[in-house]
Amino acid sequence: MEKDQIFFLKDRGIIFINGKDAKEFLQNIVTNDINKVSDTSSCFASLLTPQGKYLFDFIIVKHKSGYFLDCEKKQADKLVNRLNIYKLNSSIEILNLSNEFEVAVISKEKFLSLDGAKDIEGNTLKYNNDSVLLDPRLKNLGGRIIANLEKLTLSIKNLGLKSEDSKEYYIISHRMGVPQIDTAKLQDKVFGLECNFEKFNGIDFKKGCYVGQENTARIKLKNKLSKRLLPIEVIDGNLSENETITNNGVEIGKILINEKYPFALVKYLDKNFNRDETYKGKSSSFKIFVPDWLKI
């Protein structure tokens, strides 16, 4: 990612949660501690099933008296519906503002050149009164700008940025092991910890109760994390969703996201897993990529 590039992420949506109970509402259901979120700090979090399995993930950013949830746009309406299930008597409003706000990414280097920027995941500042933040998952995913199109266009001009194809950004994200496209294929199939959310600063084990907390804490306490979601590098052919991955006649994983930027749930500690191996599928050959942050 070069310093003066900017990527418009048309695949991202914005949910706005506002009202006097907004903070307590989110604190009771998401995996991270909302007390971390302020005008100068944002966080990554997820919403799990009661069993601790993945449903949605998002970046939480303070906006006025409420919170933006930066999520996959295809899942925005479903996320709103799920949040409304937990709303009950809370004094909040939940709005899908995906048609009003844009999400764009700049390089980490460009972010750090802004006045007041700090080299800390989630560090947040204002530029033209819009939120700009260093990605709270991994700093090398760059800075994110959330703004309406008109103001974003002005910011691009003022910062001397050049718009580039978002595919380049998503390739970087994929290589880092961060799924952002077709995440619906993960729903109810993989635990939050298996999605590497602890590695991405998305789970707080000290905050207390949230949906799925009991199983998440149990897996962590008993050190039973034997599988992780890892990116796949396709060499030839087409992957099949839910296809089993084997090596030496032993099952070592399953393909969950099979298109664009594919991921598999892999038994990464199994002796039959080899990061250098070229695996054969029904109609494909591929490698399983191990990001730099995962030490095996």
Image: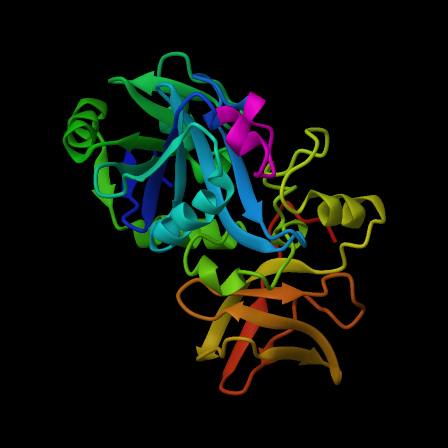
Residue nearer the viewer, 229 or 218: 218
Q: Position of residue 233 (x, y in %)?
A: 51, 67
Residue 253 falls left or right of residue 169: right
Looking at the figure, which quarter contains the N terminus?
Answer: top left
Mark yes or no: residue 100 visible: yes
Is the image coloured rainbow, by chain, by secondary structure, or in one colour?
Answer: rainbow
Location of residue 51 in the rendering, given as x and y in whole percent from the top left corner:
67, 54
Residue in front for this viewpoint, 30 or 21: 21
On the rendered structure, is 215 left or right of 105? right
Give, as a single range, the part of the protein colored magenta: 23-35
Tell me if 102 is positioned left or right of 261 in this view.
left
Which residue is pictured at 53% across the width and 49% down the height? 176
Q: Quadrant of residue 225?
A: bottom right
> Is 235 located above or below residue 68 in the figure?
below
**Magenta stretch contains residue 29:** yes
Q: Residue at x 33, y 44 (%)?
A: 13
Q: Residue furthest top?
A: 116
The image shows residue 6 at horizontal and vertical percentages of 28, 38
Q: Position of residue 115 (x, y in %)?
A: 36, 12
The residue that appears at 68% across and 35% down in the rendered structure is 209
